[in-house]
Image: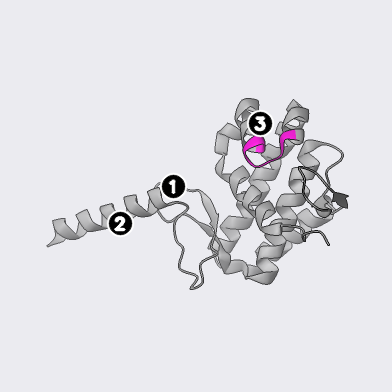
Amino acid sequence: MGAPVDLTSYAELAVQLVNMGDELKNPFSLRSLLEETGRTEAASRLTRRDIDALWELREELAGVFEAASGGDDVDVVDRLNGLLVRHPVHPQISGHDGQPWHLHLTEGGRVADALAVGSVMGLASVVTRLGVDRLGLCQASPCRNVYIDTSSNRSRRYCSERCASRANVAAYRARKRGA
């Protein structure tokens, strides 16, 4: 039997799309992200129209994370439900790269459609399995990157180790100045 759809990797794609910022408008950067995440076929078919659609999607996904960071569960769910209606899921059985048969979400059609479906479905899965509070905005100033908290104790507050270290050093220096 094939592996189940890896919705976590799709949710991480949503994080990566949001965190790309203006680099999302750069076709070379977006192709690189797609290739790094094993989406080489999508990278080869990427068009300017896809990039424009993904920029709009990025803004909508960022709104989901902002609502989650503000503790507005209802707004998060409303936003995700709206995105699920606009980007319906079309599962497809796939067998590639020596892997057994498994499911993918929308491999055909426009690249932007496939990435939107996967990103939205991945976030919906995180929200329903783990909770809205697992979606966050980095608390290191001035960073505004997003993350998914998969820690066992729900303690993640930063998008990366780099931001966590920078915030800890800043807090340490502030304490030293105040002492």
Does 34 appear above or below 156? above
Q: Which mark sits nearer the N-terminus, 3 or 2?
A: 3
Helix, strand or loop for disc 2:
helix
Task: Determine whether, in the image, residue 64 is placed left or right of residue 105.
Answer: left
- The image's colouring method is one colour
- Residue drawn at x 23%, y 57% is 172
Q: Amino acid at mark 2?
A: Asn
The magenta region covers 34-40
Q: Residues within 10 Å of mark 1 (few under 14, many from 20)?
A: few
In percent of width and height, residue 149 lies at 53, 63
In percent of width and height, residue 65 lies at 59, 56
Does 150 appear above or below 177? below
In percent of width and height, residue 29 lies at 60, 30
Judging by the rendered image, the residue that carries numbered circle 1 is: 143
Q: Which mark sits nearer the N-terminus, 1 or 3?
A: 3
Q: Nearer the viewer, residue 120 or 98?
A: 98
Task: Determine whether, in the image, residue 119 is placed left or right of residue 62.
Answer: right
Q: Residues within 10 Å of mark 3 (few under 14, many from 20)?
A: many
Q: Amino acid at mark 3?
A: Arg
Q: Residues within 10 Å of mark 2 (few under 14, many from 20)?
A: few
Picture mark count: 3
Residue 4, which numbered label? none
Q: Is residue 72 visible?
A: no
**Is 35 within the magenta?**
yes
- Residue drawn at x 44%, y 47% is 143
Residue 168, which numbered label? 2
Judging by the rendered image, the residue that carries numbered circle 3 is: 31
